[in-house]
Amino acid sequence: MKKMMDFMEEANAVVPRIGGTEAVSHMGDEDAVFIDVRDQYMIAESGTIEGGHHVPRGLFEFVADEDSPMFNPLFDKSKTFYLICGAGGMAALAGKTMKDMGFENVVNIGGFSEWQEAGGPVRG
């Protein structure tokens, strides 16, 4: 039986993590897609990445699958996805899901506070 730490170790083994400063440096990249995976109430409290997208962690399997009626064209496998959450755990798990679904370029940028501390643009 798997435990939470088993899932986290698997996710962290396949989804690279970068710091806030490096993440901010990718803001202008043509192929970069920034996604905040936190719940709406968390985003309402702190804001989110300016120019980023909000896709709750619980929807990834539905919106990233081209065969799903809920598919979101945002999930273009040729892009590089930068995922953020509150501390990095949900972003890692979402990234692992994307890797399992065939996405090659997925990065965990950790917690939203790291983004803010690095001077990343925020919208309320």
Image (tube, helix red, strand yellow):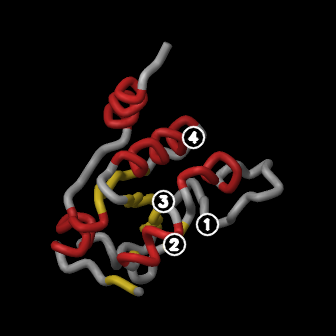
Label 3 CA crowd tier, 10 Å (few <14, some 14–19, many 20+): many
Residue type marked 1: Leu
Q: Farthest residue toward the top?
A: 1
Lower sequence index among marks 1 and 3: 3
Q: Are marks 1 and 2 in contact (CB under 8 Å)?
A: yes
Residue type marked 3: Val
Mark number displayed over residue 37: 3
Instruction: Residue 69: give x, y in percent of width and height.
Output: 83, 56
- Residue located beneath label 1 in the image: 74
Cα distance between the residues tagged 2 and 4 = 20 Å
Cα distance between the residues tagged 1 and 2 = 9 Å
- Residue located beneath label 4 in the image: 102
- Residue located beneath label 2 in the image: 53
Residue type marked 4: Gly
SS class of the residue under badge 2? Answer: strand
Lower sequence index among marks 2 and 4: 2
